């Protein structure tokens, strides 16, 4: 049903956006403030279903707990016609899913995304929040905001080891850590697994199931992704370790930051060769004499990495 023009509290609805099955979400504008928001309201089919009602309010609490520029801001929440609703920042950007559907990411680009996403996860994990649903759709590039990426979709997150049962999107199963599938409990390392799967796919456009070597992927990047995709949670690095290593790799693979090496090269003494006068042009005799004394020199060039 087209709800454009309707109103929820002080928010004027503009268009419906994709969300999970228990709610309906819209892009909306505040009537007074210059604010574009994502307004999610409980679906009418779930009115009275306590679990769904609590989950929506719980998402607002989690976002408020995180309070990070790589996470959507929560503006306010309330109840409209017996249906809980929350208004959060509308994230205007391009999801990694869309980027890698058009082309594989370069190593430098992928490592930068890995670093920035891990930074947000470190912040969340330190506050007892585990996302549990990292996918290419949930990582959005946001060049117009204060942070280069934003992680969305925190509705299924766990807080202090407590979580609601997930309704898993069929496409998201490829990024789920084994411990989430078996129901044996999970901590922040399930987010590390999912992030590794997303970045591996973004570089190769192949799902890491199982992880395999890919032509053109540097050994150092492959080694990090391989450790993140370990089947055993205890063998995976923490988000903080991933962030530190990705930060180091980002410096290695960033454009224009290649290492400099010094090499010995022989300078040609053109005064002893048969000069091509039309190409060299006229040269004064004293300059020709100076060139005669030139020997070996040292040039600085960029090392290919």
Image: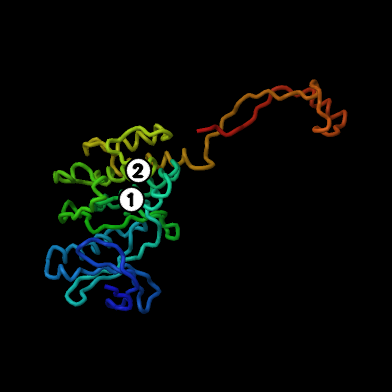
> Splitting the image into 4 quarters, where does residue 237 fall?
top left
User: 10 Å neighbourhood of mark 2: few (<14), some, or many (≥20)?
Assistant: some
Residue placed most toward the observer, 192 or 48 = 48
Element type where label 2 sits in the image: helix
Type of colouring: rainbow
On screen, residue 282 versus residue 115, left or right, reads right
Q: Is residue 54 left or right of residue 199?
A: left
Q: Label 2, on which residue?
A: 201
| Residue 275 percent location from the top left of the image | 81, 26
Q: Is residue 104 above or below residue 80?
A: above
Residue at image location 37% in from the left, 55% down from the top: 95
Query: How many circles with numbers are drawn on the protein?
Result: 2
Counting residues from the start of the chain, the first of labels 1 and 2 encountered is 1
**Percent of width and height locating residue 23:** 22, 66
Label 1 sits on a secondary structure element that is: loop
Q: Quadrant of the N terminus?
A: bottom left
- Point out residue 176 in the picture as x, y percentages from the top left corner: 23, 46
Outermost residue, right side: 285
Check if mark 1's residue and mark 2's residue have beta carbons within 8 Å.
yes
Q: Residue at x 83, y 34 (%)?
A: 281
Most distant residue in the front direction: 1
Residue on which disc 1 sits? 136
> In which image quadrant can residue 286 be found?
top right
Q: Residues within 10 Å of mark 1 (few under 14, many from 20)?
A: many
Mark 1–mark 2 Cα distance, whole angstroms, equals 9 Å
């Amino acid at each position: 049903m087209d709800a454009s023009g309707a109103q929820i509290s002080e928010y004027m609805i503009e268009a419906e956006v994709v969300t999970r099955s228990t709610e309906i979400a819209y892009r909306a504008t505040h009537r007074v403030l210059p604010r574009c928001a994502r307004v999610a309201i409980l679906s009418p089919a779930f009115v009275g279903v306590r679990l769904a009602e609590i989950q929506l309010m719980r998402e607002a609490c989690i976002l408020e707990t995180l309070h990070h520029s790589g996470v959507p801001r929560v503006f306010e929440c309330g109840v409209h016609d017996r249906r809980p609703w929350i208004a959060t920042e509308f994230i205007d950007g391009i999801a990694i899913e869309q980027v890698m559907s058009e082309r594989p990411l370069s190593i430098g680009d992928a490592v930068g995304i890995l670093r920035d996403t891990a930074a947000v996860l470190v912040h969340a994990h330190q506050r007892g929040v585990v996302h549990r649903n990292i996918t290419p759709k949930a990582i959005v590039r946001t060049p117009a905001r204060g942070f280069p990426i934003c992680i969305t979709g925190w509705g299924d997150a766990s807080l202090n080891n407590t979580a609601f049962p997930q309704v898993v999107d069929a496409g998201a199963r490829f990024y789920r850590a084994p411990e989430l599938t078996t129901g044996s409990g999970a901590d922040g390392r399930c987010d590390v697994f999912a992030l590794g799967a997303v970045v591996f796919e973004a570089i190769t456009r192949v799902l890491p199931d199982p992880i395999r070597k890919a032509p053109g992927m540097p050994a150092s990047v492959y080694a990090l992704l391989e450790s993140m995709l370990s089947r055993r949670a205890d063998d995976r690095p923490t988000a903080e370790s991933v962030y530190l290593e990705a930060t180091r790799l980002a410096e290695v693979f960033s454009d224009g930051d290649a290492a400099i090496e010094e090499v010995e090269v022989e300078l040609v003494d053109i005064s002893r060769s048969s000069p091509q006068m039309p190409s060299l042009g006229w040269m004064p005799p004293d300059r020709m004499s100076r060139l005669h004394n030139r020997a070996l020199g040292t040039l600085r060039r960029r090392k290919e990495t």
